Amino acid sequence: METFRAIMRRQGVLRYKCTPVEAEKIERVLRAAIAAPSAANTQPWEFVVVTEPGLARQVAEVLLRTQQEVVLRRLLETPEPFVEQLVGLYDEFANAPCFIVLCRHQRVALAPPEHAATVRDWDLCSLGAAMANLMTMAADLGLGTRWFGCVMVDQSSAPLKRMLNIPDEVEAIAVTPLGYHDEPPKERPVQPLEALTGFHRGDKYKLAALLQGKVALEDVVYNDRYGERGAA
């Protein structure tokens, strides 16, 4: 598949088939992930690949519970009826045969301790690039993914880390399911910028607007100087 087409085809998938993902395809998405750039080539990533059926279902349950309690209720203050409606979209989520946990493991003492926060920011950029590569390759292979960052909130990663024996010095940053699905391609309507700037917690209509589409290119691109529009 053409690179641009694979990028544009990627979408968040919640409903999966039970069909196992071939080992060679799992390896391919991981190879794409570790081809990502990183600050000073420190490659701060590690991956926990979960394919054992019982364990994969436990991971799905932890993610769904965290998404519901931490993200929807606590962070977004989503009205209860809308929480139940959104949770209903996960009815086939536990079918996912594979989950990949993206971890940060700082192996290189790149800077003095007083700059640890800066190094962590660099690492998170690198990990984001790795996850983007992984998801794009998955789309190219006809596989679905979904980015879950809820494990970074407070101590939300603790149950997952215990379950998967992830040591204290390693951070769980994000999780994605990986699997076959029947979800049709999602429309990407042009989203007004006000859907982002006008969002506020507790309003289900504002949340629904936030989750739809992508903002127009001309709303986020400046030429030569910030604030200046014009032909690229």
Image (cartoon, rainbow, N blue to C red):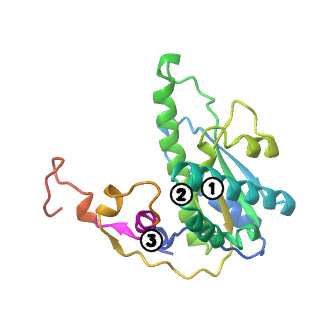
Amino acid at circle 3: Met
In-front residue for pair 21/147: 147
Q: CA distance from mark 1 to mark 3?
A: 25 Å
Q: For the magenta stretch, what is the residue range? A: 205-216
Q: Quadrant of residue 221?
A: bottom left
Q: Which residue is mark 3?
A: 8
Amino acid at circle 1: Gln
Residue 122, image x and y in percent? 47, 36
Circle 1 residues within 10 Å: few <14, some 14–19, many ≥20: many
Tell whether 153 sits left or right of 96. Answer: left
Tell whether 203 sits left or right of 62. Answer: left
Tell me, yes or no, if residue 85 can be seen here: yes
Q: Secondary structure at mark 3?
A: helix
Above or below 98: residue 66: above
Tell whether 15 sits left or right of 53. Answer: left
Q: Earlier in the sequence, mark 2 or mark 3?
A: 3
Q: Which residue is mark 1?
A: 67
Circle 2 residues within 10 Å: few <14, some 14–19, many ≥20: many
Q: Quadrant of residue 42?
A: top right
Residue 76, image x and y in percent? 51, 53
